[in-house]
Amino acid sequence: QVQLVESGGGLVQAGGSLRLSCAASGRTFSSYDMGWFRQAPEKEREFVAAISWIGGRTYYADSVKGRFTISRDNAKNTLYLQMNSLKPEDTAVYYCAAKRRLSSGSIRLGVDYDYWGQGTQVTISS
């Protein structure tokens, strides 16, 4: 069992930056690929970014590539999402999620993840 708690959301102006964190419980954090997803009002949940269990590979949605950076600190059981050059369309609830490493499925698909956080609201004003 892994418990995930996101933090760092808030209200910022367009062009600004935010850094989201996701604290994971347990001692097996390094056994999981980790991802960030988001869901805007009246929209489907979408993939944002993911990172492999040892951090060697990262994946991004085209909409955030070059602006967002995902990273992890396995010693601190923490996942991060640095978000720069924020746009109003980035407004959403952001969720972190954990996927058992080497499990089947895609690191880009939310249905293939095993654990989810409660989400943190990110609002970008124009």
Image (cartoon, rainbow, N blue to C red):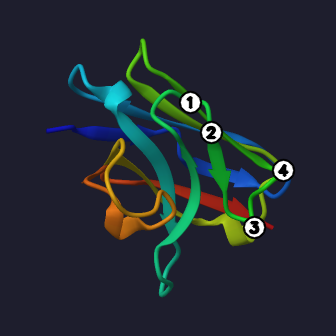
Which residue in the structure is indicated by mark 3? 63
Distance from label 4 to label 1 (Cα)? 18 Å
Q: At label 4, which amino acid type do we have?
A: Gly
Which residue in the structure is indicated by mark 1? 55
- Considering only vertical position in the picture, is 31 above or below 60? above
Foreground: disc 2 or disc 3: 2
Query: In the picture, residue 32 is in which quadrant?
Result: top left
Q: At label 1, which amino acid type do we have?
A: Gly
| 90 left or right of 25 in image | right
**x, y (%) of residue 15?**
86, 53
Name the residue nearer the viewer: 32 or 71. Answer: 32
Distance from label 4 to label 2 (Cα)? 15 Å
Distance from label 3 to label 4 (Cα)? 9 Å
Which residue in the structure is indicated by mark 2? 57
Sequence-wise, the earlier of marks 1 and 3 is: 1
Please, what secondary structure does the residue beneath circle 4 have?
Answer: loop
Distance from label 1 to label 3 (Cα)? 21 Å
- Considering only vertical position in the picture, is 113 above or below 79? below
Name the residue nearer the viewer: 120 or 31. Answer: 31
Q: At label 2, which amino acid type do we have?
A: Arg
Assess disc 3: are there few (<14), some (14-19) or many (≥20) residues with their C-alpha within 10 Å of its C-alpha: few
